[in-house]
Structure formats: C-alpha cells, structure tokens
Image: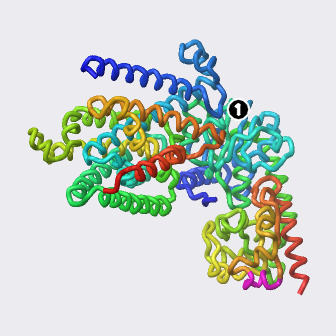
C-alpha cells in the first residue's frame, strides 16, 4: 500500500487543471465537467479509441466503476480485491493487482486492461503493452474531487462520458448527504485507521490515504494525519501514543485474525490509547471501507453513525 | 580411454545436452498461466498461427524472451562457476557464494533507479558488470592472502553485506523502476522483456567467450599457481582477465534474472565426471547444463503457483542448498 506519488500524475493533473480552466472558468469547481477528448493515463500513456469489448480490471474500485458505467458484461476478469458487485465477484481472477503477472492477465484475452498507479510491478504492465494490449493507468485519488476526476477519465476511456457525468452527480449527491456538516460535532472525535491483517501487518494510515477524507466527512479528525503520518507507517507504541485516537477503525478481517478486542489490546501501544481505554474500536470489512469507489457514501454514513453513537456514550 | 573414443564420448554428451536444451526450451514455451499447448506452440513456431491471436502475443512478447533469458542466466552462472572453481582451485567457488551476484546486485539496483521504464537497461548492465568485475578482482586479492575455507567465508560475509546495502537502497528509493528486494535475494525472470534480454546477452556472450578462450590457462590454474608458472603462464595476468569476465557475465545475468544461487556450484560438479575436467569442454558443457537447469527451474517458478509466481532462486536453492551441505560434509577436513 504505497502512497500514490507520481510526478507524472502531477503533470497530468496540471494539464487537466489547465484544460478545465481554459474550457470554462465559471464551472472549474464542478468536477463533473472534466472531459478531455483522449484518455491520458496517470503514467502519461494516452489511449485513443480503446476497444472495451473484453476488459480486465486490476482493482476493486475500478471493477465497480466499470460496472456502474454499464460495461459490466464486457468485464472478463478482475483482480482479487474485487468484492462487488456480485456478478464481478463470480468472474475469473487475473491475479493480484499489486503483484501482477503478465500471463495471468493476458490469458483472459483482454482488449483493454484497466489498472491504477498502484498496479505493480511496472514490468508486468510493460509486458502486457508489449503484447499489444492497451493498459490504462488511473490515479488513486485521496479526495472526493479526485474521485470525480477518476470517474470522468474512465468515462473518456470507455466512451461513456454521459454515464460518467451522471454517476458523478449521483455520487457527489450521496457523499454530500452522508457527510456531517462542517462545524459539527463541536468536539470531534480523533479517529485513527489502523490497517491490519494480523500481528505481522499493522499500519497506521495518515495523509494521502483514502481513509482520511472518509473520516473527515464522517465528522471525525484523522488522528494519523494529526500525528504527521504521511501515507502509512508501521504501528509502533510511540506512533499510537502521539496519535492518541479516541476511536480506532480496523478492517474486520484482520480484527478477527487478531482475536478481536482482546487480541488488539495485547499488541503494545493499543491499550494505552483513549480508544483502547474506552473500548472504542470499529471494525469494517476491508473491501467496503477501503474501496474508494461508488459505494463510498455508504462508508461515510456508517462511520458517521458509529461516531455519533460513540460520542453519545460517555 | 583412447583419444578418439574420449572425443566421441564428449561429442555425444554435447549432442545429448543440446537436444535436451531444445526440448526444455520448447517445453517451457508451451507451459504457463496462459494455456497454449503443444498444438498452439507448434503452429506459432512454424508460422502458421495468426500473429494477432493472444497465444502468439503471449509466446512472442512474454514467454520467448523469458525462456531465452532463463537460458542466458543459467549459461552465464554455470560457466562462471566452472571458471571460478578452476581459478580458485576449489569446487565450492560459486558466483553466488563468493558474493559476486550480490555485488552485481548493488550496481543493478542503482542502474535500475536511473533507468526510465520501458527503455533498454544499459546502465543497470554496465554498473552491475562493473561492480561485479571490481568485486571479482578484490576476491583475487583475498585469495592470495588466505586459505580456501576463510576465502569462501569472507565471500559469504561480503555477499551478505552487499545484499544488505542493496536492501537499504531498494527500500529507501522506493521506486517502481527498481525491482523488489526479493529480486536481489532470490531472483526472478518475470520482468524479462526483449530489451533486457538483448542488453544482457550482448554482455554475457563475449564474457563467456573470453572465459572459454582462456580454457587452457584455467586447466593450468586448477593445477596450482606454481605449476602454471612453471609451464610459462603468467597467472598474475591470466587470473584478473578470467575473473573480470566472470564479473561481467554474472553482472549481466543479475540484471536479467536477479540473484540466483547454486547454479554455478551444482552444474559444473555434476558435469565434471561426465565430460572431464578440461575447461575447453567443461565451460561450454556447463553453459548448456546451466541453461537447461535454469529453464526448467524457471518453468516451475512460474507454473507451480500460477497465476502467481514463486521466486526462481527458491527453486535453485531448494535443490542446491542440500547439495552444498552434502559437498561440505563429504570433503575431508582441510
């Protein structure tokens, strides 16, 4: 889970910003108008006139977006992080998007492969391209504006710009509805997201992770960001002490592996946090809470409700 | 054994070896995550398959460079092992064990970090070969100062240190251009493209030719420095040339397949009883044998856990580790 820091994506974003400003100064703040004619990937590789008849998606959020844009029937394989929709989960798997092999993808005979800047290794992407199959590389956004931009780009790539605009309108409305209004609650809870798959993998998320905008929208303060965490860092007692979260959010899969609350508290540093003292641990399925996709408003909704009920209990 | 019968004997082994290499190359082409099978491979090889179908694309752009890359890595490492064993007069000399591969890995990692994705990996090969070469010359200096066991152990120690430096570098740069640390510990041919294959092969082939060209000198060196000198060979000139060629061959192989252990140890040891200790024969035989071993090992690496892969070096170490242990135990105490 490296943070998406790409100089090329920065260039692409700059170019995009210039296009937006040139096109319509008045609506530059409306992310749904981002519609350049040709898809330019976050790695700088442009794809013009993609053939979306056989699509392989390499990340769960990308799968969900492609289905939302109406191209679900064209998806022939997904990566293992896809948890929704049900039709997609049933599809063959092309491997793990972060540990790709070219043959694992090519054996599904795709006409278009859609990945993101976290798709790795880069050599596998090059091999797939060398085999004549275009690979579209999307950004991994860490803000709702970035999310809308991603959908807009997918719309251009898949020639579904109208559908993308519609999806963006719906998503932004849902996010707005789920978000807690600015300034409330008056005394927001400090929320830390700790990614775990068991005792061996324990990461504290901070700035530049998709959990940050979700926590903020749900009315919390991202304790990882507050503690100065950029991207994610291995959990240490020091890091937890400095984050001092009132609430700790964990993936429910990893939480179960640890043995729930008692298991988490047995790990040095957790019991001393306010969240540990008060038993304020929230566990959400990884594929839902960490998929920065079309269902993100539901995650905000869920977290906002849980934070409100935690705030209500003294 | 008369001269002509031994010659026929050797030629027979070469014929068998080359035939086996062709068989494993074609076999390896057929097997993979994407099922092509014998029919598809044959159609494609005979030019009757469609150039646009997915099978053709997988074969041409992924599997063929990879299978040939495995052969080049195996040939380089096994021939390098045979050359080092002759030079240092111990069957335990091996480019991995002596730290050559880890040294080359430092250069490769550095070169990769400075190479844009998709370009020819010139810089990685140059740096990897250069550091491999310099490390090789350093081991020559070590060899003249100490006995065999300490010499080998010092190689292991330096290898670990260089591996650690590579690891620190890889983790600090955290660049998608640089392969993961695993590549520098257990190797992998998964990233092989025509570009890496071409650049590495251009370095490996002349280096192996240089080694082979000095086969007679290697024969004398394996008898001992004094004997070689008595026969009119200037070992002070010969040894650096051979070791430098080994450094270049190993360096280029590391760019292609990462750090792969035990090939240089295993192959010459198995082949010596079959083709004899003469380096003019042993070096090319080891190259063919190494190619066969690594092609087979890599086929396992990419198919056992398909569509995921297991590192190539795990397969060679799983075979070679016990072999090294056995080799050490059966040697009479020095």
What are the residue bounds of the magenta stretch? A271-278
Residue B139 appears left or right of A104: left
Position of residue B35 measured from the top left corner of the image (x, y, whole percent): 66, 28
Structural crowding at the residue carrying mark 1, measured as other residues with C-alpha within 10 Å and reported as few (<14), some (14–19) or many (≥20): some
The foreground one among A30 and A246 is: A246
Q: Quadrant of the C terminus of chain A?
A: bottom right
Tell me residue A299's x, y (percent).
83, 62
Residue A110 visible in the shown view: no
**Which residue appears at 60% of the width and 59% of the height?**
A2
- Judged left or right of residue B161, residue A245 is right
As for residue A276 lying within the magenta part, the answer is yes
Q: Which residue is mark 1?
A: A108
Please identify the residue farthest to the bottom as the structure is shown: A314
- Is residue A150 magenta-colored? no
Image position of B260 with respect to A175: above or below: above
The reply to whether residue A167 is in sight is yes
Chief secondary structure of the magenta portion: helix
Residue ID at (68%, 51%): A24
């Amino acid at each position: 889970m490296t943070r998406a820091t790409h100089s090329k994506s920065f260039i692409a974003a700059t170019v995009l910003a210039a296009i937006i400003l040139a096109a319509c100064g008045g609506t530059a703040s409306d992310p749904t108008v981002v519609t350049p004619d040709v898809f330019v990937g976050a790695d700088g590789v442009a794809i013009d006139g993609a053939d979306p008849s056989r699509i392989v998606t390499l990340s769960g959020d990308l799968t969900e977006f492609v289905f939302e844009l109406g191209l679900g029937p064209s998806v022939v394989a997904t990566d293992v992080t896809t948890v929704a929709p049900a039709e997609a989960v049933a599809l063959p798997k092309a491997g793990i998007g972060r540990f790709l092999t070219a043959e694992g993808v090519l054996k599904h005979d795709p006409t278009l492969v859609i990945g993101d800047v976290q798709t790795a290794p880069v050599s596998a992407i090059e091999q797939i391209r060398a085999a004549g199959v275009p690979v579209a590389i999307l950004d991994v956004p860490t803000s709702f504006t970035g999310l809308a931009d991603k959908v807009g780009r997918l719309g251009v790539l898949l020639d579904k710009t109208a559908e993308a605009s519609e999806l963006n309108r719906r998503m932004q409305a849902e996010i707005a509805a789920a978000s807690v209004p600015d300034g409330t609650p008056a005394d927001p809870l400090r929320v830390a997201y700790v990614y775990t798959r068991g005792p061996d993998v324990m990461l504290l998320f901070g700035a530049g992770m998709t959990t940050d905008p979700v926590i903020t929208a749900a009315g919390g303060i991202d304790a990882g960001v507050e503690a100065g965490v950029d991207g994610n860092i291995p959990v240490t007692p020091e890091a937890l002490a400095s984050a001092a979260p009132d609430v700790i959010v964990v993936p429910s899969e990893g939480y179960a592996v640890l043995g729930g609350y008692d298991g988490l508290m047995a790990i040095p540093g957790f019991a001393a946090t306010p969240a540990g003292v008060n038993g304020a641990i929230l566990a959400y399925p990884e594929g839902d809470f960490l998929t920065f996709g079309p269902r993100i408003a539901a995650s905000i909704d869920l977290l906002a409700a849980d934070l409100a009920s935690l705030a209500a209990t003294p | 054994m008369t001269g002509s019968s031994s010659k026929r004997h050797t030629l027979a082994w070469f014929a068998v070896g080359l035939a086996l290499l062709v068989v494993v190359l074609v076999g390896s082409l057929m097997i993979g995550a994407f099922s092509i099978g014998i029919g598809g491979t044959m159609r494609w090889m005979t030019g009757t398959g469609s150039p646009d179908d997915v099978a053709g694309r997988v074969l041409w752009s992924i599997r063929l460079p990879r299978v040939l890359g495995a052969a080049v890595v195996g040939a380089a490492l096994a021939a390098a092992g045979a050359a080092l064993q002759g030079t240092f007069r111990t069957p335990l000399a091996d480019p991995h064990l002596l730290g050559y591969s880890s040294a080359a890995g430092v250069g490769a990692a550095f070169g990769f970090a400075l190479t844009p994705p998709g370009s020819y990996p010139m810089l990685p090969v140059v740096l990897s070969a250069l550091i491999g070469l310099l490390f090789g010359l350093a081991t020559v200096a070590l060899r003249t100062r100490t006995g065999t066991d300490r010499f080998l152990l010092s190689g292991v120690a330096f290898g670990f240190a260089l591996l650690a430096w590579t690891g620190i570098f890889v983790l600090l740069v955290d660049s998608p251009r640089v392969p993961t640390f695993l590549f520098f510990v257990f190797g992998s041919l998964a990233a092989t493209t025509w570009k890496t294959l071409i650049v590495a092969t251009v370095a490996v082939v002349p280096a192996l030719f240089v080694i082979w060209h000095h086969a007679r000198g290697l024969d004398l060196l394996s008898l001992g420095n004094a004997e070689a000198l008595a026969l009119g060979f200037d070992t002070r000139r010969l040894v650096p040339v051979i070791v430098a060629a080994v450094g270049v061959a190993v360096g280029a192989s590391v760019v292609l397949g990462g750090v792969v252990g035990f090939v240089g140890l295993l192959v010459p040891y198995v082949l010596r009883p079959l083709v004899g200790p003469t380096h003019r024969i042993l070096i090319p035989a080891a190259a063919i044998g190494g190619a066969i071993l690594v092609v087979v090992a890599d086929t396992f690496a990419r198919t056992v856990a398909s569509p995921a892969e297991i590192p190539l070096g795990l397969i060679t170490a799983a075979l070679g580790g016990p072999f090294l242990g056995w080799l050490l135990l059966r040697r009479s105490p020095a």
